[in-house]
Image (cartoon, helix red, strand yellow):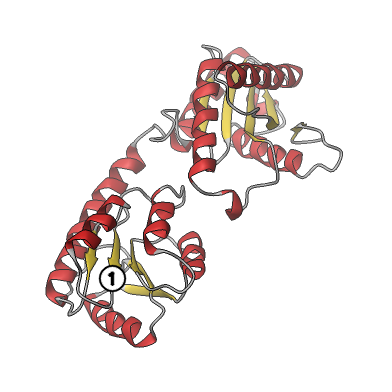
């Protein structure tokens, strides 16, 4: 009987260990227990694997050649691509000392395992943490709020689009979405990390303060935000983007923080059914316009979907 929790797919575990013999030994325990294993041999490979796959658990060895396991664990704990409930275990080739265990726990790990490995206890603890992750992920999926910023999440934005579209259809007015992100090069993994995450959270708080009561502000991606503005035309979208940019600039100066410039894209549906986009496409097209603005060699900071 499998020790892995019942799921629609085998739980995927990232195993980062520079020693092939040790990696194979752990893999020989995990695969018969019902786990799929993604292997990495360096810290860099571990980060790339964490970004490339939807992981259920991570096991990091303390002797990775290019990374300190504690630092890597801290980085994974604030990575927006890694669920906060994803269990992270550390392994060490020798016996695990109390001081090492405490350091691992302070870095955000769920445990530290030394040698010799008690395989039965390891699998039982892993199963318990995975079940807790599954429960947390289910609750998060049904939540309407982004836990880092307190804004609506993408699920809530999509629901709100349908509500506002119905109102716009009845009144024959426009529905606009303005998508915003911090200025700079298009998002890359080099931008990830605690400081980047902090800037995004700060921007979310500022947009919540600067938004109008009639607008719906939400987080639409790792560093992207969307503002749904009813009864706002395309010209009004430009004005709204400029007003939000000024407000964010004022708030950063008042807080004594470094300047935070924005990029923006927008899309407008007029009368909804007869407009340029279907209601559900307004957010998607605004995000596409935002990406076009980020790549615009002419430097236009705000772009429409069509130009």
- The residue sitting at 51% across, 29% down in the picture is 202
Name the quadrant of the N terminus: bottom left
**Quadrant in which residue 114 is drawn:** bottom left
Is 27 drawn above or below residue 297 in the view shown? below
Secondary structure under the numbered disc 1 in the rendered image: strand
- The residue sitting at 45% across, 76% down in the picture is 41
Mark 1 surroundings within 10 Å by alpha-carbon count, few (fewer than 14), some (14 through 19), many (20 or more): many
Going by the picture, which residue comes out furthest to the front?
99
Can residue 283 be seen from the camera position used here? yes
Number of marks in the rendered image: 1
Is 53 drawn above or below residue 174 in the view shown? below
Expressed as whole percent of the image width and height from the top left, the position of residue 48 reads 52, 65
The residue that mark 1 highlights is 91
Of the pair 88 and 290, the residue shown nearer to us: 88
Can residue 5 be seen from the camera position used here? no
Expressed as whole percent of the image width and height from the top left, the position of residue 75 reads 44, 53
124 displayed left or right of 215: left
Expressed as whole percent of the image width and height from the top left, the position of residue 119 reads 16, 76
- The residue sitting at 51% across, 16% down in the picture is 209
Is 220 drawn above or below residue 84 in the view shown? above
Name the quadrant of the C terminus: top right
């Amino acid at each position: 009987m499998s020790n892995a929790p019942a799921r629609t797919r085998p739980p995927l575990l990232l195993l980062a260990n520079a020693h092939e013999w040790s990696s194979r030994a752990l893999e020989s325990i995990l695969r018969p227990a019902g786990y799929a294993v993604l292997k990495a041999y360096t810290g860099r490979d571990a980060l790339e694997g964490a970004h490339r796959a939807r992981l259920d658990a991570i096991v990091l060895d303390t002797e990775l050649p290019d990374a300190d396991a504690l630092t890597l664990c801290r980085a994974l704990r604030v990575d927006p691509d890694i669920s906060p409930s994803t269990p992270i275990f550390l392994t060490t080739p020798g016996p695990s000392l109390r001081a090492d265990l405490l350091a691992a726990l302070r870095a955000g790990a769920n445990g530290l395992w030394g040698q010799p490995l008690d395989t039965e206890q390891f699998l039982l603890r892993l199963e318990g943490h995975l079940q807790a992750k599954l429960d947390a992920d289910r609750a998060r999926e049904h939540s309407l709020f982004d836990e880092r910023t307190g804004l609506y999440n993408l699920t809530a934005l999509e629901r709100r689009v349908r509500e506002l579209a119905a109102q716009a259809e009845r009144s024959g007015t426009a529905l606009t979405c303005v998508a915003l992100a911090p200025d700079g090069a298009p998002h890359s993994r080099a931008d990830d990390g605690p400081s980047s995450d902090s800037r995004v959270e700060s921007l979310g708080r500022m947009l919540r303060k600067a938004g109008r009561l009639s607008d719906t502000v939400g987080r639409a991606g790792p560093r992207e935000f969307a503002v749904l503005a009813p009864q706002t035309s395309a010209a009004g979208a430009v004005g709204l983007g400029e007003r939000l940019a000024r407000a964010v600039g004022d708030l950063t100066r008042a807080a004594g923080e470094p300047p935070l410039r924005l990029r923006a894209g927008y899309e407008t549906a007029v009368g909804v059914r007869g407009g340029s986009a279907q209601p559900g496409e307004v957010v998607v097209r605004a995000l596409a316009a935002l990406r076009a603005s980020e790549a615009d060699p002419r430097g236009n900071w705000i772009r429409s979907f069509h130009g």
